Amino acid sequence: MEQAVVIANLSKQFKNGRGIRNISFSINQGEIIGILGPNGAGKTTLLKCMTGLRNPDSGRVTLFGNDLQKNFKQAITPVSALIGPTAAYENMTPDQNLKMISRLYNGIKKADIDKVLQQTGLIAFKNEKIHSFSMGMKQRFGIATTLISKPRLIILDEPTNGLDIDGLLLLRKTIQEVSQNEGVTFVISSHHISELEKICHRFCFLINGEASFYDANTQSLEEAYVEKMGRS
Amino acid sequence: MNTTLANWKNELEKLLAKKVTKLFLTMAIVFPSLFKLIVSRLFITNWMDLPAENINFTLLDLFITVFLPLFIFIEATDLFTGEEERGTLLPVRPISRIELFLSKTMAIGFLTLIQLLSVWVSVIISSGLIDKSLEITKIFASLGVFLLSWVPLMVITVMAVMIALIIRSSILAISSMIVLYLFMIFIPYITPNLLYVLPVSYLDWYMQWLGNMSIRSIFQSVTYLCSAFTLFFTLGYYMFSKKEA
């Protein structure tokens, strides 16, 4: 099976002592990986290093066989990410925003834009300016921006933030559908153990900047997390 | 499509969606005609006696020293400092840092050129309709003057972009640009030696191309403008390439 992500000895330290230390792991194509950890454990830093938003102090990130540092464009083309607040131009509509994204890729048609807006439940608001959206709608739009490029790897940082119950169910359904039908790999960081437990195949506990993996079928995720936290 | 061009189109779309851009573009079209109309009325009543050509240069000077620098500062702040504040500066998309930097800078430069051309069209039309001073033979010469004015404005653009990348707050960035610009305008009155090392001193360099041209002074100005552009562009790109989200 092709490896979607290979991370080797990745470290990024900040002046306040936080960050990630010597992290190594790989993710196979089609897997859904959940990243769990307390606040400040380095989850977002890890995801930012995986997408080139932060430069690591040392170590390498390889996405679908392309080194991110050496070959950024090729490495990042099959990747989409939603890290932090939705990166949208709020004085423009979802349709205009997605059109702008689609210009950076080959072969994205107008019908694809409508399809992702339909998928995320935003089709009725496609011509409304994003500044009038609620937090949950903005988050849904963020998910739409990750789907539009038909990626093979989607990285989501706290995707459930601001979502209502409908949004949460829609997100779960979308992730499962896209993963099963198109074989897309997901890396999802969240505080919500129960939500991750429902969709992920494997879990990465990131505690004090160090990573350890747990398979979904070994023991209850909550127990494993508490055990791991207790040890560190 | 080439990624730089594709993103240049995106940056233009973003800027054109803003009210302030629309306001400046409208002003570039309307203001010269309105100005000439008012001046022509004053001329008729003998309050003032200004040759039409002087009014055209006054208008050009007003745009290249006041309106367009302000426009450049606003847009550079929005595309760099503002986007950094909003978290949209560095997208996870297949575009390299140099392509991103280039396309943003090109978008500001292009809209500045469009405004200059709008002012020129407005001046030409109003010259024909309002003060009846339009001479067909001078149309292309005047276009050349407007196009030449774009060159020092590109230096101001890359300088503004560099400042926008240093400062992390939009309000502080635009205030700093305005203060620095005013400083560069007025400091030569105190220390005249600084006149030739400040980029704002070259905003009216089109004057060098009129009348008796001095090849030496044009060469010196071209060398200075190219050097200043390269310096600000390189420093700006260096800072942009080091940015982290």
Image (spheres, rainbow, N blue to C red):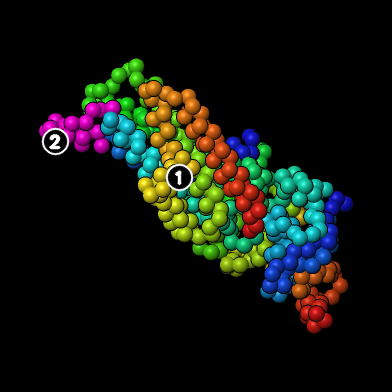
Residue located farthest toward the top when viewing the structure as drawn: B137
Res. A108 image quadrant: top right
Residue hosting label 2:
B47
The crowd level at tag 1 (other Cα within 10 Å; few <14, some 14-19, many 20+) is few
- Subunit ID for the residue under disc 1: B
Q: Residue at x 21, y 31 (%)?
A: B50
What residue is rendered at 85% in x and 50% in y? A2
| Mark 2 or 1, nearer chain start | 2
Task: Tell me where residue B115 appears, x and y as whole percent.
Answer: 41, 36
Determine the secondary structure under disc 1.
helix
* Protein chain holding label 2: B
Residue B44 belongs to magenta span: yes
Kindly identify the residue that appears in the image at 69 percent across and 69 percent down.
A15
Q: Is residue B36 left or right of residue A168?
A: left
Residue B233, numbered label: none
Q: Quadrant of the N terminus of chain B?
A: top right
Closest to the observer, A152 or B165 = B165
Q: x%, y% of residue A221?
A: 79, 74
**Residue named by callout 1:** B194
Q: Residue at x 47, y 37 (%)?
A: B152
Horizontally, is A31 left or right of B214 in the view? right
- x, y (%) of residue A209? 76, 70
Q: Are marks 2 and 1 in contact (CB under 8 Å)?
A: no
The amino acid beneath tag 2 is Trp
Q: Nearer the viewer, residue A67 or B109?
A: B109
Taking the magenta stretch, the answer to whether it contains residue B42 is: yes
Mark 2 or mark 1, whichever is nearer to me: 1
Magenta region: B35-53
Type of amino acid under label 1: Leu
